[in-house]
Image: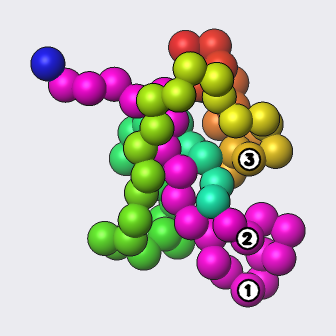
Amino acid sequence: MKKKYKFWSIYNGNPEDIEDRGWLCIPPAKKYVPEWYPKGALIKKHNETILPPPSYWLRPDYESIVYFS
């Protein structure tokens, strides 16, 4: 059986995004990996019972996809 993760995190090292630099969370599916994210770059997969606060998510609209699923 395939393991289900609660969320993934990707690293945003873009110097233009000072506020959002660091690890950002996305829903656990490849379709949510942004186009700007380098192919083959590290994606951490998490199975924690408590999700990160909304400020850690890449975009506010992604938050509801995970919180209410």
The three-letter amino acid code for the residue at tag 3 is: Tyr
What residue is pinned by disc 1?
15
Q: Residue at x 53, y 51 (%)?
A: 9
Q: Residue furthest top?
A: 68
* Cα–Cα gap, marks 1 and 2: 7 Å
Mark 3, secondary structure of its residue: helix
The answer to which of marks 3 and 2 sits earlier in the sequence is 2
Apparent side of residue 12 relative to residue 48 in the rendered image (left or right): right
* Quarter of the image that includes the C terminus: top right
What residue is pinned by disc 2?
21
Coordinates of residue 67 in the picture (x, y in percent): 65, 20
Predominant secondary structure in magenta?
loop
Apparent side of residue 38 relative to residue 40 in the rendered image (left or right): right
Q: Residue at x 70, y 45 (%)?
A: 57
Magenta region: 2-22
Q: Residue furthest left?
A: 1
Q: How many marks can you see?
A: 3
Coordinates of residue 33 in the picture (x, y in percent): 47, 54
Q: Is residue 62 magenta?
A: no
Mark 1, secondary structure of its residue: loop
Q: Are marks 1 and 2 in contact (CB under 8 Å)?
A: yes
Which of the 4 quarters of the picture holds residue 4? top left
What residue is pinned by disc 3?
56
The three-letter amino acid code for the residue at tag 1 is: Pro
The three-letter amino acid code for the residue at tag 2 is: Arg
* Cα–Cα gap, marks 1 and 3: 17 Å
The answer to which of marks 1 and 2 sits earlier in the sequence is 1
The answer to which of marks 1 and 3 sits earlier in the sequence is 1
Which of the 4 quarters of the picture holds residue 43? bottom left
